[in-house]
Image (tube, helix red, strand yellow):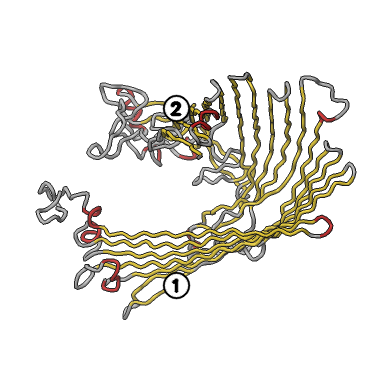
Amino acid sequence: MFNDDGTVKWYPNDYASAVNPLLNYYGQNRLYKLGNLFASMYAEFKLPFGFDYRVSFQSRISNAKDYNFWDTNTLTGASTYQGGYGTRQDYSESEWMVDNILKWNKEIGINKFDLTLLYNAEQDRSYTSQYSNQTYVPNDALGFHGMQFGTVPNETSNDTQSGGNALMARLNYTLLGKYLLTTSVRRDGYSAFGLQNPTAIFPAVALAWRISDENFFKIDLINRMKLRLSWGVNGNRDIGIYAALAQLGSNLYDNGSKVVMGTYTNSVSNPGLRWERTQSINAGLDIGLFKDRIDMSVDYYDMTTTDLLMNRQLPEITGYSSITANLGELGNHGFEMTLNTVNVKESKFNWRSSLVFSFNRNKIKKLFGDIGTYTLSGKEITGEVPDYSNGWFPGQAIDVVWNYKTTGIWQLNEAAEAAVYKQKPGDVKALDVDGSGNYTSTGDKMFIGYERPRYRLGLKNEFDFLTNFTASIFIRADLGQIGRDPYITENTSMFDRLNTFQRPYWTPTNNNSEWPALGALYNAFGGGIAIYKPASFVRIQDVSLAYSLPAALSKRIKINNMRIFASVRNLCVFTKWPGYDPESGNTPMPKTYTLGINLSL
């Protein structure tokens, strides 16, 4: 791979199309430095009438240098860019947050009050400068230290600033130790929203009743029971910090006599952009049985999210591709259960279990509000028009899969029928819903499943045995979802660079009904073959074993304590998914082994 003088050889095998893949590796010069400074300070004061005041300040300062240079003996410096190519990026950011908290706790007879008042302020500023150049003269010997010697300079800068503030009041009230009330209200502001709605108010209230503390509660089996009910509104501000503004772009153009700089508006302003709001109701029950040998919590929730922050596609005639806007209404409801049990409790052996179960169902209640007649699965429907491009349909879940229902592979004896659909034996066959003899999105696509799990399960077992040993195993499962099979077609040959799955692809002598031929029409069905497979799985997530040195032995060898442990993460997975892993998709899921010692002297 090297010449006699030590330089990297361009064509190691003297074959012009086989360029040395290590050219960039040995020829690139890179400098990357990152510095971070974190600070946290606070002060507390006792005030009259039982008030406590705390002020805290957190800050972070970050600086980064990222310099790269590819000389003329690299692919980038000689082929992609002529005469060497270099880039410099300097970045700095400073952010801070201040919290002012005033608390008051008071107990008056059978009444207990806990009041919290908060004022918060935050700010974030960043500065970015980028430079690039190429074709260095008389040579590229100085690399990124001499960017000015390039003949094709390019320079950009981007400085940003955002800020926010919040006011909050919360009261916890307890009557007789068994009737509980929590009420709060927040007023949040954020600079990214439009001038008309930079702030929003979010109220909440929660009630709880410790039934087991009542005199009439005489169930020996149950030693603890608590009912909970809550309602509240919270917000989401996860958008670009300038999403509400009309921003400028620039480009160079030739006006006939010289090259000049032009500016243009590249985004649409939305002064009415406001907070996304989620209103939720939650009902829960906590129960302790057999003196807390069994502990169970169940929750049912119903949430409605309005004014969702989304990028809405715009017609091309507007001159813009999209705008950040508040759209639609999304409903969520679900159930969560946690069950903790002490299965065995002996002097030398303990066994504890924890089971978690949950499911969630969501539905798009409103989208854009456009009413009309549209075609769906071959049927004419009058109502709110869906968003076909994003696959969003009023009345359906946001993760519903809208696609063709594949029914197998066209076989040799079906050649004539396949030709009607402009296909051939070995191609994927789908259901012709509207019977038109042609595959179309609106006529033949249908709802075939969901991308997110319909049910989630987690089971953890912990053991203490032989006095000083502990062990645990955690198993979890995601059930009911489907995923797009990334290996159903092989469109490129990569056998010279990486391994690929060996699949029984269809051939005239291997007439299977699952794997199409290697030359299958990838762009069939007016948008590409998409075959979905079950993506449910059960995973042995974590297994661990630990040994703690006995206290007497630790004292004898003059150490405080010592613990030796071993663990495995992602031990194995049980699934019908055809790829590497249903969670990682197209890449293998790593299996991690850890062996360690905790020692205190």
Q: Residue at x 73, y 27 (%)?
A: 287
**Residue 132 in sight here:** yes
Q: Residue at x 14, y 53 (%)?
A: 9
* Residue 324 against residue 355 in the figure, above or below: below
SS at circle 2: strand
**Quarter of the view holding residue 578:** top left
* Residues at marks 2 and 1, CA–CA distance in whole angstroms: 55 Å
Residue 541 rendering spot, x and y as whole percentages: 48, 30
Q: Residues within 10 Å of mark 1 (few under 14, many from 20)?
A: few
Q: Residues within 10 Å of mark 2 (few under 14, many from 20)?
A: some
- Can you identify the residue that label 1 sits on? 263
**Residue 435 in sight here:** no
- Is 381 left or right of 115, judged from the image as shown? left
**Depth order, front residue of 28/18:** 28
- Is 297 left or right of 451, judged from the image as shown? right
* Residue 540 against residue 182 in the figure, above or below: above
**Depth order, front residue of 13/443:** 13
Residue that extends furthest to the right in the rendered view of this protein = 109
**Quarter of the view holding residue 249:** bottom left
SS at circle 1: strand
Residue 348 rendering spot, x and y as whole percentages: 58, 19
Q: Amino acid at mark 2?
A: Val
- Is 167 left or right of 21, judged from the image as shown? right
- Can you identify the residue that label 2 sits on? 573
Comparing labels 2 and 1, the label whose residue is closer to the camera = 2
**Depth order, front residue of 545/584:** 545
Q: Amino acid at mark 1?
A: Thr
Residue 350 rendering spot, x and y as whole percentages: 60, 21
Q: Residue at x 29, y 64 (%)?
A: 86
Residue 168 rendering spot, x and y as whole percentages: 73, 55
Q: Residue at x 82, y 55 (%)?
A: 50
**Quarter of the view holding residue 585:** top left
